[in-house]
Amino acid sequence: MKLTEMNSAELNNFYETAKKDYDEILSRNLKLNMARGKPSAAQLDLALGVLEALHARYEFANSKGDDVRNYGIWDGLDSMKAIFSDMMEVPSSQVIIGNNSSLGIMFDVMSRGMTHGFSGQKPWARLEKKKWLCPCPGYDRHFGITEYFDFEMIPIPMLETGPDMDMVEELIKDESVKGIWCVPKYSNPTGLTYSDETVRRFARLHPAAKDFRIMWDNAYCIHDLTDTPETLLNLWDEAIEEGTEDNVFIFASTSKITFPGAGVAAMAASDRNIVDLKRHFTVETIGPDKLNQLRHVLFFHDINGVKEIMQEHRAILEPKFRKVCEVLEEEIGNLGLAEWNMPNGGYFINCNVMNGCAKRVFNLCRQAGVIITDAGATFPYGNDPQDSNIRIAPSFPPIEELEEAIRVFSTCVKFAAAEKLLNK
């Protein structure tokens, strides 16, 4: 029976049972963590071959005669570009290779816009007003960047097809709106993939601001979890056809393929944007870590090597995702307390608990020794207007600990909902 259908006596009995279960959990002194989408140790072990790929007798000069151990090659090795070209589905000539973090590249791009601007426009730091569109629930670290640079962040609701494009198309008539964050495939945290029509509408955008930029963070472009992977229409091709390629920055990395702390990140941009970015990057650094790029090239060989290791990741991750959904269904599936999804890929399970309960669930979990992502983190400024969204990250804990953590989470959801309904 759903809690909202219970009479007063039934609801009080439910509350007392949930409280008793929660008190028993407190006595266990648990220490479980599923706060962030970090790869597990078993996943990291899949890429140990990267560390063995180079040896002292290897020929370090590339086809142009550059020694990869030395300074230079600001935009990265051609062989690494070729792999990212296939991953990101853009020409290799448009790819810039960075160091380990795509988030770092995004920060640098935003910094470039702040200090020098894009498309010949005034630097963003000199504007009286500057706004950024933030589809939500979304990625908290994206929002952290625009908050750091003092943008006014405007929440854009996420629909089944992706961001509410009617709202986006209306808001970009304002010249002070300078960009939008996007995780287009297996979005963080909803797991949704943008529809073909949504991608086409992004490509057809003609904002009032000439320096408007779509930050297309395709972090999960090859992170499939099932035999029915979703496909994402190629924004680059659509933008080229529309003549709007200057609006687009595309990002990806090997962070959840090899090592998050020592992977390789990349971005793709138009020729005009690359000219702007080169001025920034070549002052910031004489060149990225090309030895790490070379290690990855020797480990992967090509895109097929990337796809092979992703199958091994799937074998580790898919059972964890299924376990979370099984436990949630078993514990709270018939109570009407929450909604969640089993995504076809990505790193997160999106859960919406009863309105007004997410912060309470978070605090109950924390007190019980289970660390989850902060309630509200998936919204700009940490402000979830419904106080309902919670991001579940199944990847890091061993499956036995994950199951225990989700059972604790479920008890907290029950306890918080009963409290609310009883006005405790």
Image: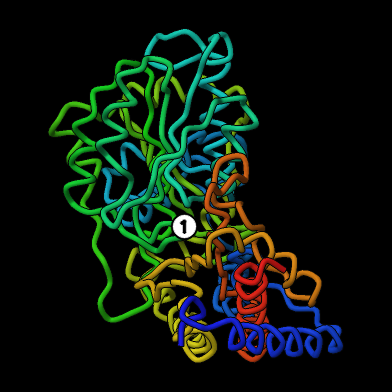
Give the quadrant of the C terminus.
bottom right
Q: Which residue is mark 1?
A: 188
The x, y position of residue 85, in whole percent, is: 32, 50
Callout 1: 10 Å neighbours few (<14), some, many (20+)?
Answer: many
- The residue furthest left is 241
| Residue 156 place in picture, x, y as percent | 40, 40
- Residue at 18 percent across and 32 percent down: it is 204
State the residue in front, 398 or 269: 398
Q: Residue at x 26, y 66 (%)?
A: 230
Q: Is residue 382 left or right of residue 117?
A: right
Q: Is residue 213 above or below residue 211?
A: below
Which amino acid type is shown beneath numbered disc 1?
Asn
* Quadrant housing residue 15: bottom right
At a point 62% along the width and 26% down the height, the residue shown is 149
Residue 44: x and y, percent?
Answer: 60, 74
Q: Secondary structure at mark 1?
A: loop
- Coordinates of residue 417 in the picture (x, y in percent): 60, 72
